[in-house]
Image: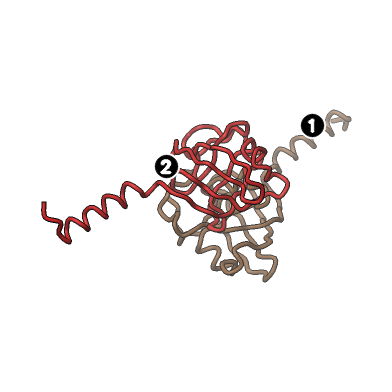
Chain colours: A red, B brown
């Protein structure tokens, strides 16, 4: 096969489309108010404050994301089952149980890194 | 009718139940990222950044809420069509169009008062 400009563009587009949901993001995390326990999430599952779940604006439901609190290096793996946060200043809202493991309950928010593969 | 202790308690409970969704709240508002335009809200309607809508954790869908930006007294009436914010540090997330009217886009958040009747 001749390697042409077209082949190169096609390969690049294929790689971009495969890689679109794998990667790393950094930003601010917050966590769910306890009062939401039992309310339906966007995936249809009720929110369970004891489960390791989170809301992300774009990742497919079911995606597992490693969340690292950059202020203390605590890590937790959460499963995306809800949409949000609405505010662009935050990249993820984690469940109460995940917030405890990340030790971000007192501060309410923390700078975090997300690592995921689709 | 004799006004008894029981009657008094009954009347108070009736009033409390009638009044449960009427009132005023103060807290922090944020607004939706533009990237959410077209995504489904919890009510099923797609989010429309040009519409006067908002997310609240508990008010029934369809409730009209007057939002006042307490830093500049700008007001807007929004219709609740989504659930959120997840974080208890905020009481409402308003649409992009509502955020423009309230002039809270630059700051990203603002202390607001909500007035509503159910």
Q: Is residue A6 above or below residue A42?
A: below
Residue B102 location (% of width, % of height): 59, 67
Depth check: A95 or B27 in front? A95
Instruction: Tell me the SS state at disc 2.
Output: loop
Depth check: A58 or B13 in front? A58
Q: Residue furthest top?
A: B6
Residue A95 location (% of width, % of height): 60, 39
Instruction: Categorize mark 2 by other alpha carbons within 10 Å: few (<14), some (14-19), many (20+).
Output: some
Residue B1 location (% of width, % of height): 84, 30
Q: Chain of mark 2?
A: A
Q: Which residue is mark 1?
A: B10
Which residue is depicted at the point 39% across and 41% down?
A118
Residue B65 location (% of width, % of height): 61, 55
Instruction: Categorize mark 1 by other alpha carbons within 10 Å: few (<14), some (14-19), many (20+).
Output: few
Q: Is residue A61 above or below residue A113?
A: above
Q: Which residue is mark 2?
A: A117
């Amino acid at each position: 096969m001749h390697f042409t400009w077209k082949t190169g563009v096609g390969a690049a587009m294929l790689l971009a489309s495969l890689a679109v949901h794998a990667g790393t993001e950094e930003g601010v995390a917050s966590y769910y108010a306890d009062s939401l326990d039992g309310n339906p999430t966007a995936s249809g599952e009720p929110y369970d404050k004891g489960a390791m779940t989170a809301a992300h604006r774009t990742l497919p439901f079911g995606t597992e994301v490693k969340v690292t609190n950059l202020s203390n290096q605590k890590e937790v793996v959460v499963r995306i089952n809800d949409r949000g946060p609405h505010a662009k200043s935050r990249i993820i809202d984690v469940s109460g149980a995940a917030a405890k493991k990340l030790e971000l309950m007192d501060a309410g928010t923390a700078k975090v890194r997300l690592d995921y593969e689709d």
